[in-house]
């Protein structure tokens, strides 16, 4: 009865995709190291913050790379879902780490706002220019693909905001050069920490929801029930329905379906219809359906009893 295909366990990725990711990782890593060393040398917290921001890129790129590598690992009886959730777990830990990075930046920014420290603004501007150039190159690399792919589009919007923050650091450095207003540097850091926080919060929310087995946000359980009840007239009632995300866009569902006291073969074709509807309308490709008949004793799960420990 478990005849539905499991081919979603085998993703195939082009090796060029892996190569592009590695290249992007290398460039971001170099710029981050440069900004980190430069931030320490010039006493610019803005540069250090931007290095922290670069770290978020490295996490994101690293996650994508990690996901490709893990998806090619075979699943077995011990880990029947393979390593899909490893990606989610890593994202959750990344988000917590980024919260710490943000806290560290805010702490130092406040200290520097109270007692500003002179920065070496000329070198600061020079290093920020290198960051700006890499961001502009990224904008042009992503621009052509951003109309086709939603993920690339969001990456594109991201590098646009990165370019803006590079420009702000350069402008800040120039103002510091002429006016010696050293509080501008921690002010810029606070701005960058907000960007990191927004990013970290998104990662935190998405991964926490997956770990809590929350219903994916684009799926409405009531709509699923309505669709099944209206499209499959044999269904009398549906209860104990769970829909959750394994990882990325791999969705799973379990549900109890009450039907008349019919032969097994008919039950099979009903389950086939349900599976097809779930797949076509809601992209759920891993559904487990429990059929129950009127003659059954009242199903305990009907009242959600197994949900209370
Ligand atoms: Zn960025
Ligand atoms: Zn349940
Ligand atoms: Zn039941």
Image (cartoon, rainbow, N blue to C red):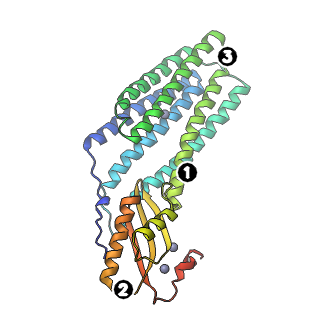
Q: Answer with mark 3 or mark 2, whichever residue precedes in sequence.
A: 3
Residue pointed to by mark 1: 205
Where is residue 235? Give x, y as percent.
Answer: 43, 76
Where is residue 39? Give x, y as percent.
Answer: 54, 26
Give the spatial CA distance, label 3 vs label 1: 38 Å
Left-right relation of 120 to 233: right
- Where the N terminus falls, by quadrant? bottom left
What kind of element bears circle 3?
loop
Residue pointed to by mark 3: 181
Where is residue 115? Give x, y as percent.
Answer: 72, 24
What kind of element bears circle 1?
helix
Name the mark nearer the viewer: 2 or 1. Answer: 2
Q: Nearer the viewer, residue 285 or 7?
A: 285
Instruction: Please tell me which residue is depicted at 62% across the width and 38% down the height of the picture.
Output: 104
Left-right relation of 225 to 147: right
- In the displayed structure, would residue 199 be above or below residue 159? below
- In the displayed structure, would residue 51 be above or below residue 271? above
Mark linked to residue 262 = 2
Q: Is residue 285 visible?
A: no
What kind of element bears circle 2?
loop
Q: Answer with mark 2 or mark 1, whichever residue precedes in sequence.
A: 1
């Amino acid at each position: 009865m478990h005849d539905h295909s499991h081919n979603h366990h085998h993703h195939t990725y082009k090796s060029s995709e892996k190569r592009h990711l590695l290249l992007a990782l290398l460039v971001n890593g170099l710029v981050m190291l440069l900004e980190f060393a430069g931030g320490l040398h010039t006493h610019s917290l803005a540069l250090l913050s931007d290095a922290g921001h670069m770290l978020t890129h490295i996490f994101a790129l690293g996650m994508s790379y990690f996901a490709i590598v893990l998806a090619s690992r075979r699943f077995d009886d011990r880990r029947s879902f393979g390593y899909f959730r490893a990606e989610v777990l890593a994202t959750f830990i990344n988000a917590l780490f980024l919260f710490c990075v943000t806290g560290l930046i805010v702490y130092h920014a406040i200290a520097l706002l109270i007692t500003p420290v002179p920065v070496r603004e000329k070198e600061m501007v020079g290093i920020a220019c290198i960051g700006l150039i890499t961001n502009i190159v990224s904008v042009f690399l992503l621009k052509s693909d951003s109309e086709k792919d939603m993920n690339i589009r969001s990456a594109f919007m991201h590098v646009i905001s990165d370019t803006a923050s590079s420009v702000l650091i350069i402008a800040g450095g120039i103002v510091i050069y002429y006016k010696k207003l050293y509080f501008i540097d921690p002010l810029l850091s606070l701005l960058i920490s907000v960007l990191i926080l927004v990013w970290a919060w998104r990662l935190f929310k998405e991964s926490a929801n997956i770990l809590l087995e929350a219903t994916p946000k684009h799926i409405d359980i009531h709509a699923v029930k309505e669709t099944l009840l209206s499209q499959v007239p044999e269904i009398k009632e549906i209860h104990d329905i769970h829909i959750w995300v394994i990882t990325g866009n791999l969705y799973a569902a379990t549900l109890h379906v009450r039907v008349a006291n019919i032969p097994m073969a008919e039950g099979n074709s009903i389950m086939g219809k349900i599976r097809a509807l779930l797949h076509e309308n809601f992209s759920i490709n891993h559904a487990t359906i429990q059929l129950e008949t009127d003659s059954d004793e009242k199903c305990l799960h009907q009242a959600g009893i197994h949900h209370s420990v």
